[in-house]
Amino acid sequence: MSLATPTLAPPPAQIPVVPAPPGHPRTRLLALDGLRLAAALMVCLYHYAGRGGVVAASWHQNPEQVFPTLSRPAAYGCLGVEFFFVISGFVICMSSWGRPLGDFFRSRVARLYPAYWAALALVTGASLILPAVIHAVRPDEFLVNLTMLQQPMGAPRVLGVCWTLWVEVRFYALFALTVVLPGVTYRRVVLFCSVWTLAAVLSTAAGDGSWAELVVMPRYAPYFVGGLALYLVHRFGGRLLPWGIVALSWILGLRTATEALWHPGAPRNPYVAMLVVTLAFAAVAAVAAGWTRRAAWPWLTTAGALTYPFYLVHEHIGWFVIRVLHRGWGIPPWPTLLLTVCGMLGLAWLIHRFVETPFGPRLKRALKTS
């Protein structure tokens, strides 16, 4: 069926944009800020109490023995990444509407890099003090990591979580070249969502290891597409076509998340994984539908500002702190966990206050001038 069919996707000029009531955009943005922090805390609990590996050495035993009750739900915290991707699709569509490609590029660079560089410096310094938490970083590894292109270059990641940034960067590139460059419209976003979904399905059918796998990202595409479509719901109302895209993205997201996390004998329950993915879509859908208008608490603005630097530093620096507090100073597990999370939030505030706030706008202006 053609996208020009009036009942499904009328031309942009025929789609009325319902004006938001006073304070409405701000309220919705605050709700998204709260969801961002919730997703970051999910990932944080996974790294501290829901997995083994290096964190087990920091606790001096597997987190299953340290937190027998918490470790089971914390094991699903890794799905906070998928939650982030749904939110990212919504926010990128919202922030790019009516903006030229240059503005989109500058805003992404100024948003991502200052806090990222600060986190790299902190983790590299920690690697020199306590290599047991992260291997000592060589100069060439550090320099390549500064570009955020360490994965395609085959270099070790200094920040364990930065693999998600490589996924985000590929999404930005796809969306910028195909939608932002010609100008963001309802039709272009719908066409982008439709083509990307089809390409993701075909890429999965063709198998892994191809260029299509690298560019199309079939495992993560449903979450970004779902977020994009939910912004269309937010902007243009509850039309059938964007809700249909959301529903299809949710179904495909259930499949990719379950396939990645579950296999016979695995500690995770596939039904719980499906529930977490469903709640992620439902939470952003609630924002899109206007059900979170009363969530206008000022502290949510701070929560949103802390999310990105907190996400960057919480893993390796947090393991470092756990090792010092629990193994070095003998503080019990629960107080150590709470102190570490609070400490990482405090560190995130320092990065936001003294790195992002002063240097982000300067970088953006410098890019515009050049």
Image (cartoon, helix red, strand yellow):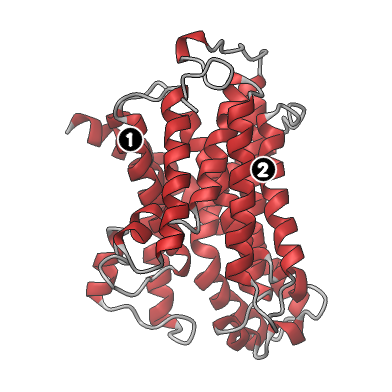
Instruction: Identify which residue, 14 or 163, lies in the foreground.
Output: 14
- In the rendered structure, the answer to whether residue 226 lies left or right of residue 3 reads right
Which amino acid type is marked by label 1? Thr
Please tell me whether mark 1 or mark 2 is closer to you in this view.
Answer: 1
Which amino acid type is marked by label 2? Gly
Mark 2 nearby-residue class (10 Å; few <14, some 14–19, many ≥20): many
Q: Residue at x 30, y 66 (%)?
A: 150
Q: Quadrant of the C terminus?
A: top left
Q: Position of residue 293 (x, y in %)?
A: 73, 26
Question: Dot 2: what SS?
Answer: helix
Residue 18, compared with residue 137, is above or below; it is above
Q: CA distance from mark 1 to mark 2?
A: 30 Å
Q: Residue at x 80, y 81 (%)?
A: 68
Q: Position of residue 158 (x, y in %)?
A: 38, 71
Q: Residue at x 54, y 77 (%)?
A: 320
Q: Position of residue 290 (x, y in %)?
A: 71, 26
Q: Residue furthest left?
A: 370
- In the rendered structure, the answer to whether residue 261 lies left or right of residue 203 reads right
> What is the number of callouts on the image?
2
Q: Position of residue 289 (x, y in %)?
A: 70, 28
According to the picture, the residue beneath numbered tag 1 turns out to be 178
Q: Residue at x 69, y 71 (%)?
A: 75
- Residue 224 can be seen, yes or no: yes
Task: Determine the image quadrant of residue 231.
Answer: top right
Residue 97, compared with residue 79, is above or below; it is above
Mark 1 nearby-residue class (10 Å; few <14, some 14–19, many ≥20): some
Residue 76, compared with residue 351, is above or below; it is below
Label number found at residue 34: 2
Label number found at residue 219: none
- Residue 343 can be seen, yes or no: no
Find out whether the residues at labels 1 and 2 contact each other: C-beta distance under 8 Å: no
